[in-house]
Each structure stands twice: as structure tokens, then as C-alpha cells.
Image: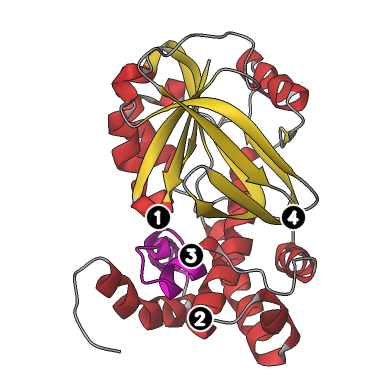
Amino acid sequence: MAAVASEDISAGAWRWQAMTSRLLPAVSTCAPCARLVFALTALKATSQSPVRATDNPTQVSNVDVVILGVKAWQAGDAARAMKPMVGADTFVLPLQNGVEAFEQLSAVLVRKHMLGGLCKIVSYLVEPGHIRHAGFEPFVAFGEWDNHPSDRVEALRETFTRAGVEAKVPPDIQAAVWNKFLFISGFSGVGAVTRAPAGVLRRLPQTRSLMERAMLEISEVAEARGIRLPGDAANQALASLDSLPENAMSSMQRDIMAHRPSELESQNEAVVRLGREAGIETPDNSFIYDSLLPLEMQARGELQFSE
């Protein structure tokens, strides 16, 4: 059985789902769990799948794998809550934005239970139990943090494939996580500062240049920390941005615009902090973080002001 932790943005909390139909062949029952219907509105069709869901992780014990899809800033609390679910052979697949989830979760759950992972999709919550897919052909990538081959990684890849989900095992999962970090932090940060969608950000020379500079800073920080990214990583990220729908926005941008707590600390602040630790200056990411900090503090109730 697989347990999926996913954020319910409208309720401001995350929900545990025991997925017993499509993900893993080993099926366990979850008697106390409520039966819900999960709806996915994709780019071309809408589908519904029954799931067993609970907001109490103690009701779902000793699962094969936990797929962690909460916001980056919720990962620590989720890790502590999921402890009853983690048996001797359970492993955890974190899909958070940023580059720190693996270490944060390992500190709580023990390193041997962890994979590195990321996903690529533009989606958002329409209402509890209803997700809208708005951009990118979705895929998930994962692997052992030291990149050694393992049976559990291959079994999970095959399981995703059988479920119709594109799954990849990169040769270097840490580089893949940083490559996603480069894209999402540049896109999220500039989008949140300007409140403009992808079509505007990529079309205006000024905002495109700001995104590129922010991405290049991340590439420099990665190199200083021993992460080997492609030399054209920023160009690849901008090419991905060019393929997004005109009105696409990142989840961090949507959260900040809606006055909700966001992943600012895990994205642009992390660039600044990790750069400082490595002796790399990050003026553009510092500008983004400093500009958004008052809104983040307001959303978290740490600062009050009228707009």
C-alpha cells in the first residue's frame, strides 16, 4: 500500500490518503479511513478515482512507500506525523520544491528510509479532492541519494509506469533536484514579485533577464556546493518556461497573491542562505526574497499592515 500526503490548501492542512487501487500491488485495508472520490481535471479529460483518506496517520500503518506531496514548509511536521506509518522496510519519496527536504526528513525518519525525488507539473487545487492539471506533461523522478541502483527504486518506477505515470531515475538525483530548484525558484520569485503570469514574464526583456540572472545565481551556488548542473541549465529552464501556458503561475506565486504562507523560505531564501554558506553572492535572489518577505510575514501572522 502507498500512503500519499497531500496539502489541502483551502483548509490549510494536509491530508493522508491510503491509495489502494492504482499505485502498489500490495494492498492493505484502512478501515477507519473515509471513502472519498478524488477528481483530476487534466488538460484533455477529467477522471475520478475512489480513495481511502484520513487526517490521522496513525490509522495507516506500516505502508510500503509514502509519497510526500505537502508544501516544503510543512515537511518537518509531516515527517513527525508519519512516524507510525514507517515500518522497517517503508521508504519515503519526497516531492517538495527546494533542495533541503531530503536532509530535513532524514533528521526525523532516519536516512535509510529516504529517497530523493521531484515532480514536474503545473496544477492547483480547485476544491478539496479536486485537482486541476494546467501545464507540463507530468512526470516524477527519484533515486537513492547516493545514486546507487536499488530494488525499491526499480519497483517504484515500474509501479508508476503501470499506473500510467511517467517515472524517471536520473543518473544523479541531487543534480536533478537542484535543476528543478533552479527553474522553480527563478520562475516563482519573479512571478510573485511582479504578480504576472508566465506569458508576460518570458515576453518582457526585463523580467526574462531577471529570471535568467536569478537562475544563474542558483547554478553558481550549486557548483560551489559540489552539484554538477549542465552548463546551459538556465537556458533549459527558460525553454521550459516558454512551453508553459500563457497564464501559468507557480504555486508559490499563487500562495503569496492569495495571502497564504508560501515556500519563499525554501526557494529564494534558501538560495541566499546556501549561497552565503558557500561564499557566493546572490543579489537578484536577495532582491526577490527581501521584496516578498513582508507579504510572507503578514501571511504567517508575524507582521500586520494594511494594503
Main SS, magenta residues? helix
Q: CA distance from mark 1 to mark 4?
A: 23 Å
Q: Secondary structure at mark 4?
A: strand
Q: Which residue is mark 3?
A: 252
User: Residue 41, percent across and down?
Assistant: 68, 48
The crowd level at tag 3 (other Cα within 10 Å; few <14, some 14-19, many 20+) is: many
Q: Which tag is nearer the camera, tag 1 or tag 4?
A: 1
Q: Which mark is residue 136?
A: 4
Q: Secondary structure at mark 1?
A: helix
Q: Please say if 163 is above or below 208.
A: above
Q: Nearer the viewer, residue 147 or 33?
A: 33
Q: Which residue is mark 2?
A: 284
User: Residue 303, percent across and down?
Assistant: 19, 76
The crowd level at tag 4 (other Cα within 10 Å; few <14, some 14-19, many 20+) is: some
The type of residue carrying mark 1 is Ser
Q: Which residue is mark 1?
A: 10
User: Residue 118, percent across and down?
Assistant: 60, 43
The type of residue carrying mark 2 is Asp
Are the residues at dot 4 and dot 3 in contact (C-beta closer than 8 Å)? no
Disc on the earlier residue, 4 or 2: 4
Disc on the earlier residue, 1 or 2: 1
Q: Secondary structure at mark 3?
A: helix
The type of residue carrying mark 3 is Met
User: Residue 24, percent across and down?
Assistant: 62, 16
